[in-house]
Amino acid sequence: MNWTITKNLPWQQMDGKVLILNTGENKAHELNEVASEVWLLITQDKTLEEINTEIQKAYDIDSDTAKEDVDELIKEFKELKLLV
């Protein structure tokens, strides 16, 4: 794993989506369905390979597309300081 969830980052799942409060940045983030699924897998300490496989199966997409999508989401999470 090349990431860790930022410390003291409260979040909760509501209606199939994840809401994250980044108190250090004074921002709230409501994740879409795919981003929420990736976030939940991250919180379960899944490896990048396991996350890619889960997303590929859940959305019936090829492995390259899953990998690109997951990589982009993790990059965005890092840019938003949700992951370090």
Image: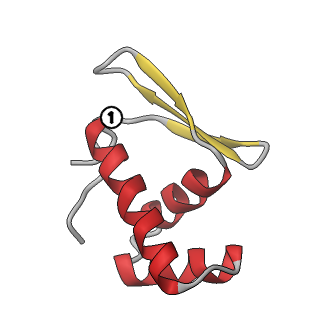
Q: For this rendering, which residue is in front, 27 or 70?
A: 70
Q: For this rendering, which residue is in front, 44 or 30?
A: 30
Report crowding for label 1: few under 14, some 14 to 19, many 20 or more residues within 10 A (C-alpha): some
Q: Is residue 47 visible?
A: no
> Where 64 falls versus 79 (above or below)?
below
Coloured how?
A: secondary structure
Q: Residue furthest right?
A: 15
Amino acid carrying mark 1 in the image: Leu
Q: Residue at x 30, y 51 (%)?
A: 75
> Where 65 falls versus 38 (above or below)?
below
For the residue labelled by badge 1, is the local secondary structure a helix, a strand or a loop? loop
Q: Residue at x 59, y 52 (%)?
A: 36
> What residue is shown with label 1?
80
Residue 82, image x and y in percent? Answer: 34, 40
**Horizontal side, residue 8 vs residue 59: left or right:** left
Residue 19, image x and y in percent? Answer: 58, 35
Q: For this rendering, which residue is in front, 8 or 6?
A: 6
